[in-house]
Amino acid sequence: MSNTSFPIPMLHSTIRIMAPFLLAAIGGLFTELAGMLNIALEGLMLIGAFFSVVFAAATGSLFLGILLGIGASVAAAYVFGFISLNLRANIFITGLATNLFAEGLVMVLAFQIFGNKGVIRFQNLPKLPVLSVPAIQRIPVLGDVFVGHNVLVYVSWVMVVIAAIIIYKTAFGLRVRGTGSNPDAIEATGLSPRRYRMYAILISGFTCGLAGAILSLQMGAFVPGITAGRGWIALVAIYLGNKTPHGILIACIVFGFAESFSNYAQGAINVPADFILAFPYIITVVAMIAYSIVRHYRLKGSER
Amino acid sequence: MDRKRIANLLSSTTGLALTVGISFLIVVLLILVLSDEPGRAIYYFFIGPFTKAYYFGNLLNQAIALMFTGLGIAVAFKSSTFNLGGEGQAYSGAIVATVILLALPNMNGFIGGAAAIIAAVGMGAFLAGLSGFFRMRWGTDQLISSFLVSAAVILIINYLVTGPLDDPVNSMLTTARIGRQYQFLRIFKPSKLDISIFFAVAAAIGTYFFMQRTHWGYEMRMCGINREFSRYAGINVGKYLLVPMAISGGFHGLAGAVTIMGTHYRCLKGVTMGIGWNGIAVALIAKNNPIAVVPAALFFAYLEAGAKAAMLHSDVTFELAKIAQAVIFFLVTAQALYGLFRSRKKVGS
């Protein structure tokens, strides 16, 4: 391997790895802006991952699989939202509940349907189509990094743009933001903050379902713990991205690169697999502490 | 005043009954859908733990660790600090205790055992204390930082258990066995119930007195009710972002050590899995009251024992317990279920 070719595959896989982070974080941004700490991202993703690959294999259609996977995740998000909002439960506890429920449900179903709680492989699973644009592919570095991914990766980038438009350019986005920053004002205009919170939760269900679908469909299998803390890391990406879509994009590039880097490090030097798995968590917690230190001193500075 | 108390008690018991009832209903529905012999599965899920002394003893044994983790969470929540890293703290307690006991094969049982327990408590307290420190110093979100630290720690311990500390004699993913002198006395053979259940109950009573009758406990509760007010009242508020977390982590480390010394005698991969999360549910059911943690832990252990019995005697899998527990998690803080008898006070949405 020549010295120059090493970083390009690493950047290429960064783009692939960051897609689920990006989707989950964008969905989580809506709930965050609506004033809720949504720790259910992880569980919603897991449900999306399981049902999309199972339905894709059962129906032989990727599209149906993704659709039903998202449907399952949105349904779970609805239950999460209903109990949190309508039954007035603590949203942080119900978020935990969603994660535990997703884990339990997936294991029980995997065991009863496939007789297997481990890795489930699917024969005849259609492959995610890869997008290739020859015109861009010919550009040296750019082409190598950004072309040749499966379509869902590009969908995730499009979703960031759509989310930014919804949040900043539509009345709906304004109301979601208002629900978080000033629910009384929303109430005074005759709208229900609760309804906008529910919409935000359903949106997070939608994006997390898609994020999960990417994970399992690109692997062509379902693995227990397939989400591997990505929902939590996405949550941190929202904070690090200062609760803006472009900030989240940058944060996800950083986390994607960190994971891609650790994958390559594993190939180069002999690092135990568990350390590789622990690396994203460590990077995330360090980033989070660094962020809070910076914010702490900035706040102190502005007080003077 | 008295009527209000009765109404409160009534509403919280009916709420709890509803929560438990709904979770049971969902388990029954799942069994009906998934099992080929639903009658048998349902029977063993609910009655199974009481059919044999062996199952019942194991149920009690399972509750011990949950009592410790539940107490840890209750102390943290009561002080308005958030510890989501219980899983990693308990696991770290388990591995630290195991390593120390393996390093001292010929030590006196009491001295070595005490050293292992102290180290396990210290390790758990340190890990949770980190998150407390970050929040105290820089305002870092405690919820997320404690989870992330714990998630990383779990993976590193997995590496230790399956790598450098793996017992080559044994084909399982586990460390070697700890010495006989460190193994807690079993009091209800052939079940795994050991003497530490008395320690757990004593700890619950001790925690109750600590929270209600001591200066620290009082200040912690004050901070839990209103941190801003406590600051103006002259309480060192920063200290109580750290201390409850450290206590909470210490309890989790203790739960890990007790799991090793009382039940497994070796640190298997993922030996403490689930006791951290379930500790949170236990504390919530107990409404953060240390005494009530004891029955709440027994109830959670019952769910697991039931699922185990159902798995052994029918065609359903153990993870049914997870679903039942998750449903309880979902509903246990739902004010709508708990406010049925609270007519006067309207809870804002």
Image: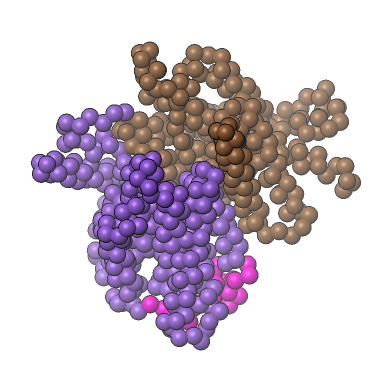
Chain colours: A brown, B purple
Q: Is residue B335 above or below residue B218?
A: above
Is residue A158 shown in magenta? no
Residues B47 and B79: in front is B79
Residue B135 in percent (x, y) is at 50, 47
Q: Main secondary structure of the magenta part?
A: loop
Q: Is residue B153 above or below residue A150?
A: below
Residue B158 in percent (x, y) is at 57, 61
Q: Is residue B214 above or below residue A139?
A: below
**Number of dots carrying numbers:** 0
Residues A49 and A183: in front is A183
Residue in view at x 53 percent, y 54 percent: B130
When asked about the image quadrant of residue A17, the answer is top right
Q: Left or right? Give the position of A14 relative to B125.
A: right
When asked about the image quadrant of residue A136, the answer is top right
Residue numbers of the magenta segment: B162-184
Residue A232 can be seen, yes or no = yes
Residue in view at x 16 percent, y 31 percent: B344
When asked about the image quadrant of residue A301, the answer is top right
Residues B65 and A104: in front is B65
Residue B103 in percent (x, y) is at 56, 79
For the N terminus of chain B, the image quarter is top left
Q: Residue furthest right?
A: A2
Residues A194 and A140: in front is A194
Residue A47 can be seen, yes or no = no
Is residue B167 shown in magenta? yes
Residue B327 in percent (x, y) is at 34, 44
